[in-house]
Image (cartoon, rainbow, N blue to C red):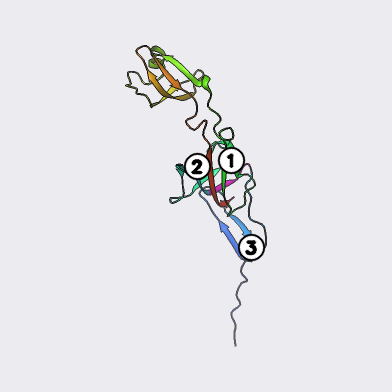
Amino acid sequence: GCQKKRRPRAASAVVAYNSGLPATTTTMSNVSPAVVTESAYLTLHYRLAGADGTDIVTTFGTNPATLMLGQGQLAPFLEERLLGMAEGEHKTFTLSAADGFGERNPELLQWVSKATLDENSVPGADYKAGDLVDFAAPGGGRFAGMLREMREDAALFDFNHPLAGQHLQFEVKLISVL
């Protein structure tokens, strides 16, 4: 009998492709899982919560996030926790205020004159305590402050990060590392 010869298949090649990145081929063997490096491209679920467990932001239960480390998509202290994690790992980190967004700095509570406020933010806006107000910074940048108190001639702003002074939980489930 006549037998048809089959071409041998590539040794269990797995092809990973993600929008805009070149396809990569890996041969399945006993290689250790990929580990996060300073410029890794990641797919992960993450959750940032207060010390009491209340979610501040989470991707669990929705689509996972994809990001490249070192691009400012995550705060540097969160990126540091990911370094060395292996693909498939699921960890929760407890962060003190100092390890997170820092302790609250009383010097960042500042009075801003009504004239300066009008000049550097949305003219004629009706601000109320608790509003986060965006300012034009010298040199062209932007910064934000939480309005604490409004008076006739001035406003008290808190320029601390809203999460400054808080202990946090950072939960990560690493799906893939490229």
Which quarter of the image is occupied by the N terminus? bottom right
Residue 39 in magenta?
A: yes
Q: Which mark is residue 79?
A: 1
Residue at numbered disc 2: 48
Which residues are drawn in magenta?
A: 38-43
Could you tell me the amino acid type at mark 1?
A: Glu
Q: Nearer the viewer, mark 1 or mark 3?
A: 1
Residue 130 rendering spot, x and y as whole percentages: 38, 27
Q: Which mark is residue 28?
A: 3
Q: Nearer the viewer, mark 2 or mark 1?
A: 2
Q: Earlier in the sequence, mark 2 or mark 1?
A: 2
| Dot 3 alpha-carbon crowd within 10 angstroms: few under 14, some 14 to 19, many 20 or more | few
Within the image, what quadrant is residue 99 found in?
top right
Within the image, what quadrant is residue 8 found in?
bottom right
Residue in the image at 53% along x and 49% along y: 44
Could you tell me the amino acid type at mark 3?
A: Met
